[in-house]
Amino acid sequence: MANEIVSATEIVRYREDGVVCLRNVISADWIERLREAVDANITNPGPMKRVTTSSGQPGNSSLDFQLWYRHEDCRRFVFESPAAEIAGRLMGSREVVLYHDRLRVKEPGTPEGSAWHHDQPYYPIDGDQLISLWLPLEAVPGSTNIEYIRGSHRWGRWFQPRVVTRGSTGAFAEDPRFEPLPDIAAERLAYEFLSWDTEPGDVVAFHGLTLHGAASTSCCDYRCRTWETRWCGDDARYAARVGQITPALEGHGLMPGDPLSCAMFPRVWPR
């Protein structure tokens, strides 16, 4: 990629497709440091950890959030790694704010997928500049990896979020823009799907309104750890939502219409 952290071609792909796979943009040193932090978090998880494996199903899958609060190497990754600049270049934003991070751990033999959804309706955020950087800490084959619907971020549609957890209240975020999700599985011929074999050091960057999901298949015959960081740009604004927001980040003091920048959501780029 010469001296560019992301190429002009990759920027075009992200903006047209809503997703792009960036190869080998995170160094082996960062990967090893994140693995150590993640393993420490598995031993001593945070207060927002939740098990996502369906009751009675084999294996174990879980989510946890805000590792950057608790683990120094995760915090240093947020502030010192290329991730924030990658997000800013892809979004075309002058500044970048960290929204949150999320860890998924999937144990061997866990036949759990991910229902079709896009992320932004789950968050109290309006604006076009919301991006996720999905970072695998193990190799993930394309046959079991997440699929993305090409160009779906440009449909101008917001689909009803669905929070599936053990003991979920069933109260979901509400907004007049939300509509029922199409039956993607029944209409696969209507869409173009993108997915990749990924290795540690690769990053899949995707827009907050890009539809994505994964089949209910076992990921690997080893523990699969993936860490996502979510970032906002210049036009992101805090928005009122009625119902359940995930993750439930409270105490930030923002009001609807405020720029998304505060101690909880720090500006990290430019440095």
Image: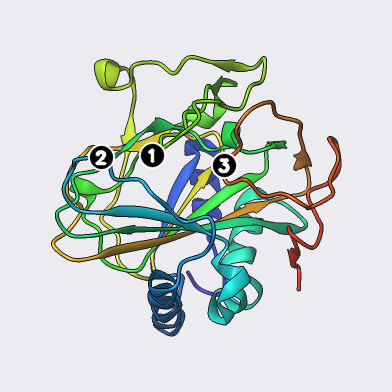
- Mark 3: few/some/many CA within 10 Å (<14, 14-19, 20+): some
As drawn, is 39 to the left or to the right of 154? left
Mark sitting earlier along the chain (2/3): 2
The residue to which callout 3 is attached is: 246
**Residue under the point 21% across and 47% down:** 144
Which residue does the numbered mark 1 point to in the structure image? 166
Q: Looking at the picture, does residue 76 appear above or below residue 157?
A: below
Is residue 189 visible to the viewer in this orientation of the structure? Answer: no
- Please name the amino acid that badge 3 sits on: Thr
Q: Which residue is mark 2?
A: 55
Q: Are marks 1 and 3 in contact (CB under 8 Å)?
A: no
Tag 1, which secondary structure?
Answer: loop
Q: Amino acid at mark 1?
A: Arg
Which is in the foreground here, disc 2 or disc 3? 2
Proximity of marks 1 and 2: CB atoms separated by less than 8 Å:
yes
Q: Residue at x 21, y 55 (%)?
A: 141
Q: Position of residue 124 (x, y in %)?
A: 69, 37
Q: Position of residue 265 (x, y in %)?
A: 73, 58
Residue 89 drawn at (x, y percent): 64, 57
Q: Residue furthest front?
A: 167
Residue 33, x across and y down, in percent: 45, 82
- The tag earlier along the polypeptide, 1 or 2, is 2
Q: Residues within 10 Å of mark 1 (few under 14, many from 20)?
A: few
The total number of labels drawn is 3
